[in-house]
Amino acid sequence: MQSSTFPLAQACSAVSQYSKAALPTIVAQFCGNAVLIFFATILVALCADLVLVPGEALADEAPLSIQEAQRRAVERSRQIAAQNASVTASREMAVAAGQLPDPVLRFGIDNLPINGPDQFSVTNDFMTMRRVGVMQEFTRSDKRELRAQRFENEAEKSLAEKEAVIASIQRESALAWLDVYFAEAQAKVIAQQNAQAKIEITAAEAAYRAGRGSQADVFAAHSARATLEDQASEVGRRVANARTMLARWVGDEPAFSISEKPAMDSIRVDSSTLDMELGHHPQIAILTKREQIAATEVRLAQADRKADWSVELSYSLRGPAYSNMVSIGVSVPLQWDQRNRQERQIASKLAAAEQARAEREEVLRAHVSEVRTMIAEWQNGRERVARYERELLPLALERTKAARAAYQGGKSTLTELLLARRNEIDVRMQKVRLEAETARLWAGLNFLFPDFASPSNANDGASK
């Protein structure tokens, strides 16, 4: 009989030279009985994971971190360029709105005869004049300042919208990164269990050939592996879709690898000061700027109760026998029905300002409630993940270990081992899914604000 020693280097070397389909043959070369085959195949499968899997997963560049994904997403975004253009447009309009209106050039002919001996003559009749003049409206300075201020408020609103866009991009790109990370984590769980399923198939076939097992055990092992293959196919689809969504943010780089997940034990908001912090949230800031714009329009409507005057200066040229003339005039709008015009406009602007104020307060209340709920769910998710790590997963592993020992000792059937293995898979997958849900809540909370505009220092977000 061959030695029961199974050198790790020798096994890894063998695996690197043969395909995974040749594992039973490789095992048989090193071991001589069914028990040794079982343990040796475990070691060979682990070597296969060490030798083959990392080599396939390695990319030429450094793994993509969540921070790098966010940076690339912000750099590639055209929404930010659009918001910058909006800011520029509003500020340019603010300068233009602060100026006096353009002067008006006016020219014409006054008192032109249309019959008689001087018909259509511009020089014979003493009343006929060729006139050229300039009219200027002198808009009150307070009105011009308010109009300029309105567009400055529009520019500030665009800046708030830009921060909201940056926060949204960072949040969505982080969520896309997390989707890839946890989809691949599920794929790893399935791959590990699939390797174990192959080992169990080899062990079941060896036991059947040795007369210690039944053909039903062989079929059960193959069925379990087929189920895992189906799950692997489904998870593979999720990985591909998640990578496609991440590429939408970071660029079309299908070969990128994902780095380790960041620490998710803290968030940048504190539930005890949430009302104050969310008052500076980009979405609330946009509504605040809208309220300021509405208030400026109220003041502008109030200023319109004082009419703007226009001044006109003209020069009139008459025939050679008559003197030329200069005229000056002032135009004043007659606000003879202020009650139904100017006052109505003021009332309309006041109502619009009240609407903007009420909408901002309502959105702030809803946002505070939503964020408080997210914080509670995030804290509960952390507790559940800790419970899985502390209790549920170790218990599932011990159950599988006990079932394997009993099966190897001939005290239980392969079916019981497969049930324990299935339970372990379910616990592992549920843990990954729970971690993914908790991580998505973390991203939603941690990137409520752009990372360069954190409202407070990092804290655990707990109300203690």
Image (tube, rainbow, N blue to C red):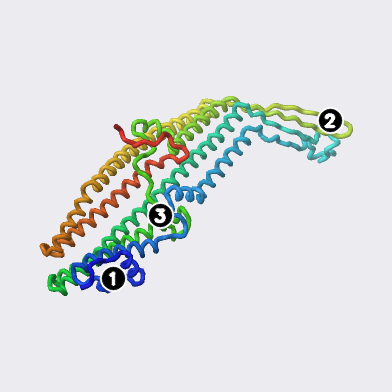
Whichever of callouts 1 and 2 sits on the residue coming sooner in the sequence is: 1
Residue 217: give x, y in percent of width and height. Answer: 16, 69
Classify mark 3: residues with Cα within 10 Å, few (<14), some (14-19) or many (20+).
Answer: some
Report whether 181 appears left or right of 153.
left
Q: Amino acid at mark 3?
A: Ile
Which residue in the structure is indicated by mark 3? 258
Q: How many marks?
A: 3
Q: Nearer the viewer, residue 149 or 423?
A: 423
Residue 172: give x, y in percent of width and height. Answer: 41, 48
Q: At 19% across and 51% down in the image, what residue appears?
A: 395
Which residue in the structure is indicated by mark 2? 324
Label 2 – label 3 distance at C-alpha: 87 Å
Q: Nearer the viewer, residue 249 or 365?
A: 249
Q: Amino acid at mark 1?
A: Leu
Residue 262: give x, y in percent of width and height. Answer: 38, 46
Q: Secondary structure at mark 2?
A: loop
Label 3 – label 1 distance at C-alpha: 30 Å
Q: Which mark is residue 23?
A: 1
Report whether 193 appears left or right of 90.
left
Classify mark 2: residues with Cα within 10 Å, few (<14), some (14-19) or many (20+).
Answer: some
Residue 444: give x, y in percent of width and height. Answer: 37, 44
Q: At 64% across and 29% down in the image, what residue appears?
A: 139
Whichever of callouts 3 and 1 sits on the residue coming sooner in the sequence is: 1
Label 1 – label 2 distance at C-alpha: 114 Å
